[in-house]
Image (cartoon, rainbow, N blue to C red):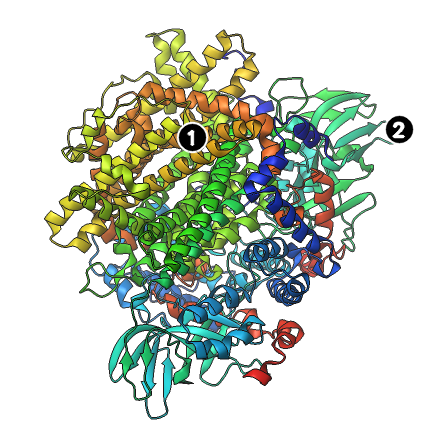
């Protein structure tokens, strides 16, 4: 086992990258650079010019906005600055008729605050200065009518696409005016406040790939064209019949030494490039992954820059068949496309040749191993968690929890008025585990990001020791978080009853968007199995030289494999289950047992004579199970460790610890069989854990609204009739429905079909 | 025919036609169903537009058109039997969603159940022929499941002998009724009846909402579409706001309760028949769960047989993804569930018909249990199906996300089943109420019968739940009967725990209602365990009734897989109750993997046996002939976005390039 997997090899990685077809990607290509520069590079704020006398906010010098617009922006930021002084944060837009009056049912929830919401928001933002910057950007974005999301639910696919292009265009103009640099925090916050509903996401992947796989000359030629949008790029890897498995790709690039050109060709139906974003209608150039054939030999996958549309009139170039792949569940703003190449000739210089090149005579020269390629994939995974996956769960929780205090239904006691649905235990059971996850995953994703930066500095120095662990963690956590967030969003949607089915609730769109993350950037089962390989390898390492010095060298996230293990859980009361030490140990125990079990199954099959690969396939179900337990352990541990750092803020620590307890216990109870299996927990202890879990619910109930307020989503960004800050869900629902085109436009079906149906009525009525 | 599918079909251990007959109830049913389906397939009037490429308003228009044609065609083909109408609609409507649907499913039945003979004479004929189109307006924007909370009022005015209907608040606006937004011109409105200064609770009123001839909303009526939804694009779910709107006294449905011309209220006789309608709809929904899940499985299994990916052994050609254990583990338990629900659905339908006959003879004794069981099974099957459809979609990878797969459409059409006709959590708690009642009955020394009779075996001396450990734990994991016993023990244990926790809370809280709320998570668990037991039991019994050996063998494997998978997923319950030992759980997990391998050769035949026409599936990935990729390309090319080579939005790109 060990020898066959010396490290997460390139092959494996590229397979993955292939799976990670470049459709639905958020604004994340800039991430590493932005993070590397630090969060504080605020673009405009440093330039002092017209400082606001009331709040001290300074617009950038390059900013020449009309006075009215300035005023609106200023009002918004003024409200925020008041909020920072301790008042509740009123995140509603200026000029909104309902903004001044709070629904009493939601106001009462905010009356007595057991902790300072603003402080929690600062923690989530990574510092008060980031909160301030984010809000500043949000108020700018929200005061631009072109960037409003309000009509999204009423638009056709065509209109969504056009709007996304328009918005991207608008934000680029804004950025230019305000001095927001490429990859800056401002641009990230801007993207967050329009929910990533922007065009050209893959253009940035195109540019980034050229930077990592291109030679210096190639970068010098293409990079400025990309930055100035003189060309628009896409990244074409996935094919109609091929995803996860890169070697299976069929597109060919055959070198013709006579003309010094590559002939790029789609030999079969299944070879048609399928899914790349920005390809269907926008891109002028595609980075095509194809099998290189030169001097008669196949050299594997390489990347080629292929012009696909005319720079004059945007029409497809000769030999190119191109179009949109048709309607999808979501990502309607992205023109995922298909591309069929019929012996398209491109110059030799269009093959990206940092790591391999073809000489004019057709000689193939390998120049190294593209490890950066591998790293960029890890980055992308880390980045989608923070940019595309987690915020969607946080939004869903905000909407569902707010609506649950507005919605009254049935009575708890016959004499009472109808109760808020959040007071029902079953509703708490639906909403609080996702809420706890929304917090847990915040700390997990940020921890992963830190680990990435830490490893990255070593890797730059040529030390790849941390790479296998980084790879395993990012793959596994991407799979786990996208799975759980998708389930959590759907749970929130259904917890809103019938109204959760209306698009105006915002929840269907959150679901259809987050669910794509389970298959893009690596299909989740494939990713779990990659982590499994790392776990098995690590475990076998511990077995090689029992008790030796090797133990110390186990990667940090699997160090628990050799930690002393208890055979029985020591808990004696329900309260014992509120000790982080106790539940973290319990998760570690189950993870170790399942990993051992996993290895045992594999070895048994091998000893029985099964071929290595068949043995692997016959044990994959248990590998996935073991990996999931491992990842749960990792997330529980990260969450509890993050809380230790917050002990200086006792009120916040207390409220977050309840979420941490709930998160760990919910996992134990839903997987009770795994804990009972070897008698680690007794039946009586499971009952204690259940009691501890149920007792947490009413405590979290008191803080629930504040916990969702702390995510600090603006109403515009939530774009939900049910989840607005002021709680006036019903009025908004009614108002928004009336704006639907079904009400504002005529009803052709009446004239054509209903009227004839109704004929003869007068005779009888 | 795709060679992979050809190979799969040739290698099956049984003839799918025989299994189709089992699912249809008889070979004759299969024959007649196909005959009706062919009427539609061969009729040019029933051309199916590809809904995926239409806007919402176009989809609505197509749905109205289909309904109009359907009325004529059914008359022409002489299709009047309810089952045959169902077959007809299922193929023809694909999503089974039609704007005039509520006219038939709610307006007319309510008229029949609650209208006087005179009222039926006046309204029935014209509504049957769609000369008036009715809908049923119950749910309000702020009120759903809790009927007594509805706010719409109907106040009787004896001077003019009229009712004044009013929506006093925003939350009282009628919200969601299908066909209300644009199609209907009448609605049966549920409102709080006020007469002689007193409120008499909810009653039903026939309310004209649109002017005949112009279709314009009548004065005092605000009506419209509630806007875009997750699915149900074909349906104009609507809102209705009434502003002191007057209707004649005769428009109150008065078969049971009456308001005399002078305003005197006459109480209804006890009426359990409305109960019956509810039971019917819920048992119908169990069948719909089975149908939707079967469709999703058909698509995912066929595509998994056609799709090749990666490698198991280096150097060999890419294998069908159905050969991966993880793929089998994702799909086969769902396939087994689809079969389980098919049989449960059929059982519910039979039981309903049988009990309905009893009710006709005045025997209402079985109604409470049936009511409790339909509520729980509706929730259990729809929750399971909801998750399962999504799992099928994800098992199709990236292409599952495209509408070409048909799976997003199946999901969004199905998922409201979890909240409509009674929110699932509330449904589970209704079943729990029945279980608690039965438990108390046993404790007071009376035996209970039916599906809950296992509660009779709970020896009353066992106070501590842990003591169920003394129950024999000789579960044979290869015997469906023995597994049914195990599920029975689990249900018994969880019912008992919920009952005891409820008692404890009652003692502490001094309020039954608060205690109920604080035990509701346990109560839902108990109901789920009860429903799970019922499903395993019915599936097991069905397998034993099958005569044909090859069919019985394959169904037995599915039944075992269904039962064992449930144990594996809920191992905690079986271990904690000492119903099974740790080593048995390990055996269960091992046996599941063996079953995956055993079912693999029959997988495609098993989904073929559901016998869905390609038009019903609406899926490029799930085509019967397996020619997926060619058709996917053709499908995409038809997308309206590809009508021109250079899209009109090019202007934005152009200006971007010039300004930066």
**Do the CB atoms of the residues marked 2 and 1 lie less than 8 Å apart?**
no
Tell me where residue A34 appears, x and y as whole percent.
49, 42
Up-down relation of residue B187 to residue A482 (above or below): below
Neighbour tally class for label 1: few under 14, some 14-19, many 20 plus, Cα within 10 Å: many
In the rendered view, does B609 fall on the left or right side of A389?
A: right
For residue A30, say whether it is visible. no
* Quadrant of res B470: top left
Which residue is denoted by mark 2 in the rendering?
A258
In the current view of this chain or complex, which residue is farthest to the bottom?
Answer: B159
Q: Secondary structure at mark 2?
A: loop
Find residue A136 and report its image quarter: bottom left
Residue B301 placed where, x, y %? 59, 35
Q: Nearer the viewer, residue A74 or A573?
A: A573
The span from disc 2 to disc 1 (Cα, nearest Å) is 63 Å
Q: Say whether residue A158 is left or right of residue A500.
A: right
User: Where is A580 relative to B110, above or below?
Assistant: above
Q: Which mark is residue A382?
A: none
Residue A296 on image: x %, y %: 81, 21
Residue matched to label 1: B565
Label 1 marks which chain's residue? B
Q: Who's the residue at 76% across and 45% down the image?
A: A308
């Amino acid at each position: 086992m060990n020898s066959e997997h010396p490290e997460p090899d390139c092959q494996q990685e590229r397979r993955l990258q292939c799976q990670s077809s470049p459709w639905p990607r958020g604004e994340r290509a800039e991430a590493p650079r932005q993070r590397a520069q630090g969060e504080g590079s605020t673009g405009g704020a440093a330039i002092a010019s017209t400082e606001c006398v009331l709040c001290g906010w300074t617009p950038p010098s390059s900013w020449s906005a009309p006075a009215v617009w300035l005023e609106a922006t200023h009002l918004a930021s003024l409200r925020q600055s008041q909020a920072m002084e301790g008042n509740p944060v009123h995140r509603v837009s200026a000029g909104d008729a309902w903004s001044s009056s709070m629904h009493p049912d939601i106001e009462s929830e905010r009356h007595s605050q057991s902790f300072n919401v603003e402080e929690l928001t600062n923690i989530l933002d990574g510092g008060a200065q980031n909160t301030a910057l984010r809000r500043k950007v949000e108020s700018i974005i929200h005061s631009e009518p072109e960037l409003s999301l309000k009509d999204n639910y009423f638009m056709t696919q065509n209109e969504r696409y056009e709007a996304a292009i328009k918005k991207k265009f608008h934000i680029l103009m804004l950025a230019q005016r305000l001095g927001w640099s490429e990859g800056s925090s401002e641009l990230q916050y801007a993207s967050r406040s329009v929910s990533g509903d922007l065009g050209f996401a893959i253009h940035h992947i195109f540019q980034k790939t050229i930077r990592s796989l291109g030679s210096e000359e190639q970068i010098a030629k293409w990079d400025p064209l990309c930055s100035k949008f003189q060309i628009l790029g896409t990244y074409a890897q996935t094919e109609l019949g091929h995803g996860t498995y890169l070697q299976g790709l069929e597109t060919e690039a055959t070198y013709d030494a006579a003309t010094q050109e590559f002939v790029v060709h789609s030999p079969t139906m299944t070879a048609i490039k399928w899914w790349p974003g920005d390809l269907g209608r926008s891109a002028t150039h595609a980075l095509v992954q194809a099998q290189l054939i030169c001097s008669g030999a196949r050299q594997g996958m390489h990347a080629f820059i292929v012009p696909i549309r005319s720079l004059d009139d945007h029409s497809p170039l000769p030999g190119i068949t191109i179009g949109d792949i048709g309607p999808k569940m979501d990502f309607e703003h992205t023109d995922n496309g298909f591309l069929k190449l019929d012996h398209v000739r491109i110059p030799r210089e269009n093959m990206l040749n940092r790591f391999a090149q073809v000489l004019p005579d057709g000689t193939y020269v390998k120049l190294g191993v593209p490890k950066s390629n591998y790293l960029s994939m890890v980055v992308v995974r880390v980045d989608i968690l923070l940019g595309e996956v987690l915020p969607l769960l946080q939004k869903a929780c905000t909407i569902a929890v707010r609506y649950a205090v507005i919605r009254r239904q049935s009575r708890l006691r016959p004499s009472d008025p109808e109760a808020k649905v959040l007071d029902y235990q079953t509703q708490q059971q639906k909403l609080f585990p996702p809420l706890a996850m929304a917090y847990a995953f915040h700390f997990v994703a940020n921890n992963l990001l830190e680990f990435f930066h830490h490893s990255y500095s070593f890797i730059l120095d040529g030390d790849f020791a941390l790479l296998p662990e980084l790879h395993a963690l990012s793959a596994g956590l991407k799979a786990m978080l996208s799975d759980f967030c998708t389930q959590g969003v759907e749970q929130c949607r259904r917890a809103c009853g019938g109204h959760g089915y209306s698009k105006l609730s915002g929840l269907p769109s959150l679901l259809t968007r987050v669910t794509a993350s389970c298959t893009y950037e690596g299909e989740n089962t494939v990713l779990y199995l990659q982590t499994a390989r790392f776990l098995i390898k690590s475990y076998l390492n511990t077995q090689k030289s029992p008790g030796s010095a090797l133990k110390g060298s186990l990667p940090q996230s699997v160090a628990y494999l050799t930690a002393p293990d208890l055979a029985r859980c020591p808990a004696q009361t329900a309260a014992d289950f509120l000790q982080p030490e106790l539940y973290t140990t319990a998760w570690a125990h189950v993870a170790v047992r399942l990993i051992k079990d996993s290895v045992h199954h594999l070895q048994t099959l091998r000893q029985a004579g099964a071929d290595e690969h068949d043995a692997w396939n016959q044990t994959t179900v248990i590998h996935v199970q073991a990996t999931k337990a491992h990842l749960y352990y990792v997330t529980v541990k990260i969450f509890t460790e993050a809380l230790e750092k917050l002990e200086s803020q006792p009120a916040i620590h207390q409220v977050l610890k309840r979420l941490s307890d709930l998160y760990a216990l919910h996992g134990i109870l839903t997987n009770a069989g795994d804990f009972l299996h070897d008698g680690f927990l007794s039946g009586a202890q499971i009952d204690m854990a259940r009691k501890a879990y149920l007792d947490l619910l009413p405590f979290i109930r008191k803080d629930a609204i504040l916990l969702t307020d702390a995510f600090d989503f603006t109403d515009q960004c939530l774009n939900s009739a049910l989840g607005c800050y002021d709680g006036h869900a019903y009025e908004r629902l009614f108002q928004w429905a009336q704006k639907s085109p079904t009400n504002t436009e005529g009803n052709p079906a009446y004239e054509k079909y209903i009227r004839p149906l109704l004929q003869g009525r007068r005779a009888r009525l | 025919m795709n060679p992979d599918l050809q190979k799969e079909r040739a290698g099956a251990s049984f003839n799918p036609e025989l299994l189709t007959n089992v699912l249809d109830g008889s070979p004759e049913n299969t024959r007649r169903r196909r005959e009706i389906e062919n009427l539609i397939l061969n009729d040019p009037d029933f051309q199916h537009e590809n809904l995926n490429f239409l806007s919402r308003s176009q989809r609505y228009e197509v749905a109205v058109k289909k309904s109009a044609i359907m009325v004529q065609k059914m008359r022409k083909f002489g299709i009047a039997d309810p089952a045959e109408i169902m077959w007809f609609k299922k193929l023809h409507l694909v999503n089974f969603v039609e704007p005039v649907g509520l006219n038939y499913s709610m307006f007319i039945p309510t008229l029949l159940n609650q209208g006087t003979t005179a009222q039926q004479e006046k309204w029935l004929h014209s509504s049957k022929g769609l000369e008036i189109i009715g809908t049923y307006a119950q749910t309000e924007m702020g009120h759903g499941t809790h009927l007594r909370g509805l706010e719409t009022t109907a106040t009787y005015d004896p001077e003019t002998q009229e009712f004044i209907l009013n929506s006093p608040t925003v939350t009282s606006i009628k919200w969601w009724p299908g066909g209300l937004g644009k199609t209907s011109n009448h609605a049966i409105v549920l409102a709080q009846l006020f007469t002689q200064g007193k409120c008499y609770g909810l009653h039903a009123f026939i309310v004209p909402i649109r002017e005949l001839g112009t279709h314009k909303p009548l004065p005092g009526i605000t009506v419209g579409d509630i806007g875009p939804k997750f699915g149900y694009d074909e349906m104009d779910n609507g809102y209705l706001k009434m502003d002191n709107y007057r209707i004649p006294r005769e428009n109150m449905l008065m078969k049971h309760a009456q308001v005399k011309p002078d305003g005197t209220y006459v109480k209804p006789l006890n009426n359990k028949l409305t109960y019956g309608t509810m039971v019917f709809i819920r048992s119908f929904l169990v069948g719909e769960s089975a149908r939707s899940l079967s469709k999703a499985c058909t698509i995912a299994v066929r595509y998994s047989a056609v799709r090749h990916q990666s490698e198991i052994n280096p150097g060999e050609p890419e294998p069908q993804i159905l050969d991966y254990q993880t793929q089998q583990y994702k799909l086969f338990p769902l396939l087994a569930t689809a079969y389980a629900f098919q049989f449960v659905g059929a059982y519910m339908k039979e039981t309903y018909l049988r009990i309905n006959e009893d009710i006709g003879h005045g025997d209402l004794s079985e109604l409470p249990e049936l009511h409790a069981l339909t509520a729980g099974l509706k929730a259990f099957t729809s929750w399971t199906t909801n998750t399962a459809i999504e799992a099928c979609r994800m098992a199709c990878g990236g292409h599952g996300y495209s509408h070409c797969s048909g799976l997003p459409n199946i999901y969004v059409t199905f998922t409201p089943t979890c909240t409509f006709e009674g929110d699932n959590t509330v449904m589970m708690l209704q079943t729990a109420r029945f279980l608690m009642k039965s438990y108390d009955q046993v404790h007071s020394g009376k035996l209970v019968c039916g599906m809950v009779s296992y509660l009779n075996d709970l020896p009353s001396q066992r106070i501590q739940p842990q003591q169920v450990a003394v129950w024999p734990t000789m579960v044979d994991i290869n015997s469906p009967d023995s597994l049914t016993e195990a599920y029975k023990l689990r249900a018994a244990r969880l019912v008992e725990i919920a009952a005891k926790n409820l008692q404890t809370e009652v003692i502490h809280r001094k309020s039954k209602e608060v205690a109920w709320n604080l035990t509701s998570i346990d109560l839902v668990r108990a109901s789920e365990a009860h429903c799970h037991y019922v499903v395993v039991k019915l599936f097991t019994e069905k397998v034993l009734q099958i005569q044909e050996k090859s069919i019985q063998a394959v169904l037995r494997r599915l039944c075992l897989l269904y039962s064992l998978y449930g144990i594996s997923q809920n191992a905690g319950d079986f271990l904690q109750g000492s119903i099974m030992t740790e080593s048995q759980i390990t055996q269960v997990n091992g046996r599941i993997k063996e079953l995956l391998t055993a079912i693999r050769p029959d997988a495609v035949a098993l989904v073929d046996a559901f016998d869905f026409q390609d038009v019903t599936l609406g899926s490029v990935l799930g085509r019967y002939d397996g020619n997926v990729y060619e058709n996917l390309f053709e499908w995409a090319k038809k997308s309206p976005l590809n009508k021109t080579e250079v899209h009109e939005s090019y202007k934005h790109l152009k200006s971007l390039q010039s300004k930066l």
